[in-house]
Image (tube, rainbow, N blue to C red):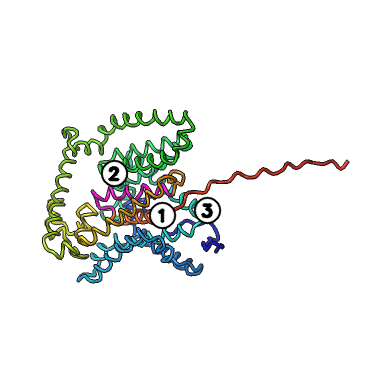
């Protein structure tokens, strides 16, 4: 431990649970389902990370709770949401496997405190190693998504599970994160390869049939450009050539997207669903049907939850299948499917499970996330790990509003992991000082 009280790792290691987060980012849904139910590889990696962190911090005398409690809100909001979910579970009548699965999304909130504590006690080398692992995960995800999207014949590895099988919403969101990261690198350092990676990632996102992932990707791009312009304002003012280049890039990108988006799977469905274009293809009509089914499902969930004061206030808890009890399953799938336990909207699911109390606490977590983003906005573009913390939670929230994402580990672990970085309240990177010039040594002849 150094004089400032920060624990120094013996060798540069990644932040706690980075492997688990990177695994979920790199593999997505099919990776999250590798294992023998109810034990999965992603959860095992997370358990190992928790055990390692506990032992390491105990040996170093690190006190995780004190470090995060000094940061108060929004850490208290995350703790309150997880605590309320745990209390609701303990007070419920069902403590079986279904109840545990329903509780899991909120239990993953503990990941945020692990990450925040590790970040607060990390060195620049630790954070650099973390960023490298996350970059490998993003590139690995892109590399298997390309053939999987084009021509790969997925091989089954279990009931209903195929190796390298894309899931449009979460995989499209991860591709959006890749596009944001490499766009930022291109704006900072140029390079055709960086631009190509960003364009290919965004193109793959739009080629998927998920309107949610397309919206999430554009939200991430807007956040990335916002942080870049805020951080580069002085550079743009002092470098007229750079200013002209950026000014010319913006209308070019806008026009290109306006022409390309209606021709993509996600873009055409999105425009048809909001009435911007006439739905005339089977894909667009299918998108309208899906949107209508979701709205009907959400209405039934809201009506059922608000039907009694107890459900309105504290929700149905964990275990009961409100999708069957409310008839929402029929509205969404036209069938009473007992395996369907989410209304494809994390906010409504939280409302049904935890009532107005849980929805209020979730709102506080989101406000805390937005406050964390606002706090780092001016230097996020100069620290790629912080930038990822700025874009990943909002991107995951967007896709979670239209699908089962945060209810699963492939969405919940990355969301809370990067939220933990914001909880640690990162500081602006310290600019490297130029090495002092050493006096030139003159060789003196002995003669």
What is the CA distance from the residue labelled 1 to the residue labelled 2? 23 Å
Instruction: Report the residue at 19% width, 36% height from top.
Output: 272
Marks 1/3 in contact by CB < 8 Å: the verdict is no
Circle on res. 421: 1
The mark that comes first in sequence, 1 or 2, is 2
The mark that comes first in sequence, 2 or 3, is 3
Residue 242 in magenta?
no
Q: Does residue 402 sit above or below 423 in this rendering?
A: above
Circle on res. 213: 2
Circle on res. 125: 3
Q: Secondary structure at mark 2?
A: helix
Q: Secondary structure at mark 3?
A: helix
Q: Specify the principal SS of the magenta part.
A: helix
Around disc 2, counting alpha carbons within 10 Å, would you say few (fewer than 14), some (14 to 19), or many (20 or more)? many
Residue at the limit of the structure toward the right, as seen here: 447
Q: Quadrant of residue 79?
A: bottom left
Residue 398 in magenta?
yes
Drawn side of residue 306 relative to residue 65, left or right: left
State the extent of the magenta-drawn residues as a range.
386-405
Instruction: Report the residue at 15% width, 59% height from top.
Output: 305
Q: Secondary structure at mark 1?
A: helix
Residue 108 can be seen in this image: no
Q: Position of residue 392 (x, y in %)?
A: 36, 49
Q: Position of residue 65 (x, y in %)?
A: 41, 66
The mark that comes first in sequence, 1 or 3, is 3
Rendered-image quadrant of the N terminus:
bottom right
């Amino acid at each position: 431990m150094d004089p400032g009280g920060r624990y120094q790792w013996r060798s540069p290691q990644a932040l706690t649970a980075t492997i688990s987060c990177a695994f979920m980012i790199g593999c997505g849904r099919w990776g999250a389902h590798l294992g023998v139910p109810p034990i999965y590889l992603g959860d095992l990696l997370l358990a190992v990370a928790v055990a390692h962190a506990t032992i390491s911090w105990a040996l170093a005398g690190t006190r995780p709770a004190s470090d995060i409690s000094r940061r108060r809100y929004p850490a208290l909001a995350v703790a309150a949401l997880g605590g309320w979910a745990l209390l609701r579970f303990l007070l419920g009548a069902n403590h079986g496997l279904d109840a545990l699965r329903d509780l899991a999304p909120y239990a993953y909130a503990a990941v945020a405190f692990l990450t925040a504590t590790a970040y607060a006690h990390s060195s620049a080398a630790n954070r650099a190693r973390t960023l490298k692992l996350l970059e490998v995960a993003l590139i690995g995800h892109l590399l298997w998504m390309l053939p999987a999207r084009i021509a790969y014949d997925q091989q089954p590895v279990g009931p209903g599970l195929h190796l390298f099988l894309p899931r449009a919403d979460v995989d499209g969101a991860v591709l959006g994160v890749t596009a944001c990261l490499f766009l930022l690198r291109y704006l900072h350092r140029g390079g055709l390869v960086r631009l190509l990676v960003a364009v290919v990632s965004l193109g793959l996102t739009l080629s998927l049939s998920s309107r949610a992932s397309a919206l999430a990707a554009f939200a991430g791009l807007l956040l990335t450009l916002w942080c870049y312009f805020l951080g580069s304002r002085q550079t743009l003012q002092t470098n007229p050539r750079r200013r002209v280049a950026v000014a010319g890039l913006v209308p070019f990108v806008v026009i290109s997207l306006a022409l390309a988006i209606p021709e993509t799977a996600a873009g055409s469905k999105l425009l048809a669903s909001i009435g911007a274009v006439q739905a005339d293809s089977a894909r667009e009509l299918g998108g309208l049907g899906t949107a209508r089914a979701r709205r009907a499902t959400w209405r039934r969930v809201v009506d059922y939850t608000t039907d009694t004061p107890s459900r309105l206030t504290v929700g149905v808890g964990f275990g009961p299948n409100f999708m069957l009890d409310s008839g929402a399953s029929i509205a969404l799938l036209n069938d009473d499917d007992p395996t369907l336990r989410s209304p494809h909207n994390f906010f409504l699911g939280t409302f049904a499970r935890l009532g107005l109390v849980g929805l209020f606490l979730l709102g506080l977590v989101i406000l805390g996330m937005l406050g964390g983003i606002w706090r780092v906005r001016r230097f996020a573009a100069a620290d790629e790990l912080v930038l990822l913390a700025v874009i990943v939670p909002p991107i995951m929230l967007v896709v979670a509003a239209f699908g089962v994402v945060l209810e699963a580990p492939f969405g919940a672990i990355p969301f809370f992991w990067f939220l933990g970085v914001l909880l640690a309240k990162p500081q602006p990177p310290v600019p490297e000082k130029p090495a002092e010039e050493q006096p030139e040594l003159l060789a003196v002849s002995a003669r």
